[in-house]
Image (spheres, coloured by chain):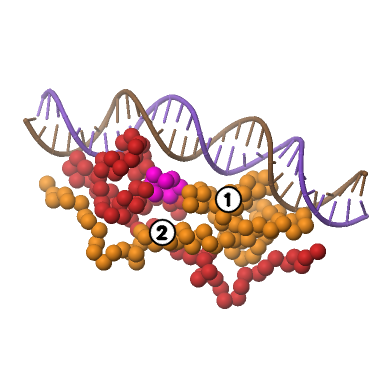
Chain colours: A red, B orange, C brown, D purple
Amino acid sequence: MNNVFKALNDKTRRDILELLKKEDMTAGQIADHFNFSKPTISHHLDLLKQAELLTSVKKGQYIFYSLNTTVMDELLKWMLQFTAAAMPLTPKKKPGYEGK
Amino acid sequence: MNNVFKALNDKTRRDILELLKKEDMTAGQIADHFNFSKPTISHHLDLLKQAELLTSVKKGQYIFYSLNTTVMDELLKWMLQFTAAAMPLTPKKKPGYEGK
DNA sequence: TTAGTATTTAGATAGTTGTCTAAATATATA
DNA sequence: TATATATTTAGACAACTATCTAAATACTAA
């Protein structure tokens, strides 16, 4: 789970995820959308893969990358515990400070 | 939005959020839950505040910190675009590779 | 005012991260 | 085989981050 937050903590990597929302792409096609060297993009793809936000399939010379939304679902669950919708009917304890 | 991912990219800070889910606490009370110095926790609280994940109110000597779920809601929205529930009825374009 | 408590600010340091170029690996094709 | 293309690995470096101790600030209470 730590890896997921780490992976999402970078604009370029989040942009890669948005790109792949539309269609699967090869590493080269992805790199063409950014002003970074291919090794740099390759590195970002690696981190996204480690976080299991992407999957990859090699086909001939090419490696196709796809979104993996499974982890996003877990993250969603984590976040829901903080939102109003997930709050208990009895409100959380408020601090005992009584003014002065 | 960048600040939010940055703030969440640290276990201690995520633990602080979980702590505050139960009840509001002072900086000192929060610090007592961790094996880090108070300045270190103060720094983490500052980053969480910058990301607007926390609010703080000073009362006398004490500063009470509370969760602010507004940003979590925004983050939820961002994430929903990647999940199955948010997918269009027409599936995304698949790569045109035809084997060989 | 003086002493004590709560918290933050400042400055230092080790470790991590994003980026690059150069080189290596793997596949395709002539 | 030799050459070209796609991608990754390796190594270097500047910038950023988490942590610490020491000092500063702000408030409380004697």
**How many dots with numbers?**
2
Q: Relative to C19, is A81 on the left or the right? A: right
In this rendering, does residue B89 appear at all? yes
Residue at x 37%, y 42% (from the top left corner): A44
Which label sits on residue B50? 1
Report the Cα–Cα distance between label 2 and label 1.
21 Å
Task: Tell me whether marks 2 and 1 sit on the same chain.
Answer: yes
Residue A55: where, in percent of width, then height?
30, 51
The part of the chain drawn in magenta is A6-14
Residue B71: where, in percent of width, then height?
52, 59
Residue B72: where, in percent of width, then height?
50, 60
Residue at x 45%, y 54% (from the top left corner): A1
Chain of the residue under label 1? B
Please name the amino acid that badge 2 sits on: Met
Q: Relative to A68, is B32 on the left or the right? A: right
Foreground of the two, A74 or D1? A74
